[in-house]
């Protein structure tokens, strides 16, 4: 395609930034992506360590179902994703209770038969939300034009959207209460555990509409990716480059130049100045604010700040620890404890037949738990010894919980290292190591991609609709639409 001469600089080669870059590159924009690390993916990367390839975080291969966001993106960009479907999205383990979260939900209903009417309603609402995700979501509206377009769309879809209206301002717990499920402690515990990993908060705070689609991810089916979850970013980067764009690795961005209400260039660590007509920041708002010098930055849409980081263990484990199981993901929740901080863990295990991930006879395992950054910051300030003691305490706690399900696994671990919130801050550039996006507590208090600069946009899990591969890709399409609307009318060269 003939180029239109419009220079786009994308900061960060995460899935959001690469999706925007790949789509704009295909449309003729001159796209340059600057990435600090030597590989793409950000929080959804797969990185090498010795003879292993570890997924950086607890990212699950969602959204590849027919007409799902990743399926549609692949068709548009000509990408064939290296995927294989999984029999179950993940196993949920809480004490003696084990539930395979499959597409049918049969095991959930078998464990909680009284919940069937709720799941029927959830499925109807989720189907509506998935259909909306195939369009550009003009939420939150970024200006008067968006408000008018949104109003017209809502008028056309009013009969279809009516089931969603009663839930717009309800929490997931209030939604459960309408089915008499709010006093079922075991069921609420199950829902809380699912929502914490998908919308970053629990049923008492999560918005019911956000919860509806988050709870639908296992039902839509999950997929394993050959080579790890980072294959998504690698394929997107290749598509971008095939259409004339480029990704520059090992290139840290140190500042953004601005002129009145426009940004004009990006300055990288090697002293290069990158002039730009459009800048896309695949960053958290806090990190972007730092690049702009702090005080001059404001968001058009104010929303909840991400509150969680993560503590992650990377393990090289003998295959015999899994007793022939083809398990891909396991969620283990300790009884009678607050979720997170080692009391609930999400375990991702590389497939036995993926020779790209681990040596023969071993598996690459990523174990993640939600963690607040503040204790880690305090420990680091106290001294190296306090920081290492805290890391050891978390490691031992997680291995203990892991061994409750995988008996004897501690004797079969041959490689082990950890990432704390401060590690995430260092490697991703996310201030305080915030990962996973914002807690999705309200549809009316979320961030959109717009900023106070006319040609600077945010993408990634910090903007609506938030985390997960489907959420990030859906949000990226909104950014592409904004760039095209603002700059796509220039004459092609």
Image (spheres, helix red, strand yellow):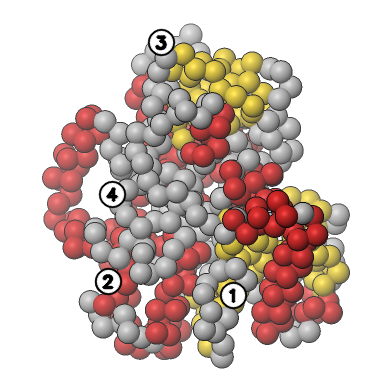
Residue beneath disc 2: 175
- In the structure shown, which secondary structural element does the residue marked by tag 4 occupy? loop
Is 32 located above or below residue 150 in the figure? above
Where does label 4 land, which residue? Answer: 444
The numbered mark, 3 or 2, whose residue comes first in the sequence reads 2
The mark lying in front, picked from 2 and 1, is 1
Q: Position of residue 61 (x, y in %)?
A: 56, 58
**Spatial distance from mark 4 to mark 3, Cα to Cα?**
38 Å
The residue that disc 1 covers is 343
Task: Work out whether mark 4 precedes mark 3 in sequence or the reverse, and give the earlier one.
Answer: 4
Q: Nearer the viewer, residue 37 or 133?
A: 37
Label 2, secondary structure: give it: helix
Q: Position of residue 64 (x, y in %)?
A: 50, 55
* Crowd around label 1: few <14 · some 14–19 · many ≥20 (10 Å): some
Q: CA distance from mark 1 to mark 3?
A: 57 Å
Give me the C-alpha separation between circle 4 and circle 1: 31 Å
Q: Is residue 31 visible?
A: no
- Judge depth for marks 1 and 3 and give the one in front: 1
Q: Which residue is mark 3?
A: 491
Q: Earlier in the sequence, mark 1 or mark 3?
A: 1
Q: Residue 176 — which label? A: none
Q: Is residue 345 left or right of residue 140?
A: right
Residue depth check, mark 3 versus mark 2: number of the one nearer the observer: 2
* Residue 383 placement, left or right of 335: right
Q: Residues within 10 Å of mark 3 (few under 14, many from 20)?
A: few
Label 3 SS: loop
Q: Quadrant of residue 403?
A: bottom right
Q: In percent of the image, x 38 and y 27: which residue is there? A: 452
| Label 2 vs 4, first from the N-terminus | 2
- Picture coordinates of residue 390, whole percent (x, y): 72, 65
Residue positioned 55% across, 32% down in the render:
290
């Amino acid at each position: 395609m003939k180029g239109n001469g419009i220079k786009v600089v994308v900061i960060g080669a995460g899935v959001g930034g690469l999706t925007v870059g790949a789509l704009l590159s295909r449309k003729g924009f001159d796209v340059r992506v600057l990435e600090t690390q030597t590989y793409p993916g950000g929080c959804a990367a797969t990185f090498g360590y010795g003879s292993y390839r570890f997924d950086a975080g607890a990212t699950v291969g969602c959204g590849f179902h027919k007409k799902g966001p990743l399926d549609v993106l692949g068709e548009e960009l000509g990408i064939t994703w290296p995927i294989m479907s999984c029999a179950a999205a993940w196993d949920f383990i809480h004490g003696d209770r084990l539930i395979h979260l499959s597409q049918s939900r049969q095991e959930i209903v078998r464990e909680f038969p009284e919940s069937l009417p709720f799941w029927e309603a959830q499925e109807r609402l989720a189907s509506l939300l998935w259909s909306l995700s195939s369009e550009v979501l003009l939420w939150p509206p970024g200006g008067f034009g968006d408000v008018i377009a949104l109003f017209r769309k809502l008028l056309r879809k009013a009969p279809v959207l009516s089931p969603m209206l009663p839930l717009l301002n309800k929490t997931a717990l209030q939604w459960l209460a309408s089915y008499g499920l709010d006093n079922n402690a075991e069921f609420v515990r199950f829902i809380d555990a699912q929502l914490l990993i998908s919308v970053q908060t629990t049923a008492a705070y999560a918005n019911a509409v956000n919860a509806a689609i988050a709870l639908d991810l296992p039902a839509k089916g999950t997929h394993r990716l050959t080579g790890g979850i980072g294959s998504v970013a690698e394929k997107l980067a290749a598509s971008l480059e095939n259409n004339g764009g480029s990704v520059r690795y090992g290139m840290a961005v140190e500042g953004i130049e601005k002129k009145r209400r426009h940004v004009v260039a990006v300055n990288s660590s090697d002293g290069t100045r990158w002039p730009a007509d459009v800048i896309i920041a695949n960053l958290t708002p806090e990190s972007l604010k730092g690049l702009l010098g702090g005080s001059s930055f404001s968001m058009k849409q104010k929303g909840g700040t991400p509150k969680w980081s993560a503590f992650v263990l990377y393990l090289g484990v003998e295959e015999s620890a899994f007793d022939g199981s083809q398990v891909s993901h396991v969620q283990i929740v300790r009884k009678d404890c607050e979720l997170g901080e080692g009391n609930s863990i999400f375990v991702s295990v590389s497939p036995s037949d993926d020779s790209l991930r681990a040596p023969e006879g071993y598996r690459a395992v990523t174990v993640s738990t939600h963690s607040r950054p503040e204790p880690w910051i305090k420990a680091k300030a106290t001294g190296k010894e306090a920081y290492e003691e805290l890391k050891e305490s978390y490691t031992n706690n997680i291995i203990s919980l892991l061994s409750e399900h995988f008996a004897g696994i501690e004797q079969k671990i041959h490689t082990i290292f950890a990432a704390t919130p401060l590690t995430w801050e260092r490697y991703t550039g996310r201030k305080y190591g915030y990962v996973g996006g914002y807690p999705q507590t309200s549809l009316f208090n979320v961030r959109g991609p717009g900023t106070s600069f006319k040609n600077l946009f945010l993408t990634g899990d910090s903007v609506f609709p938030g985390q997960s591969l489907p959420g990030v890709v859906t949000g990226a399409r909104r950014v592409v639409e904004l760039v095209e609307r603002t700059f796509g009318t220039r004459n092609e060269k």
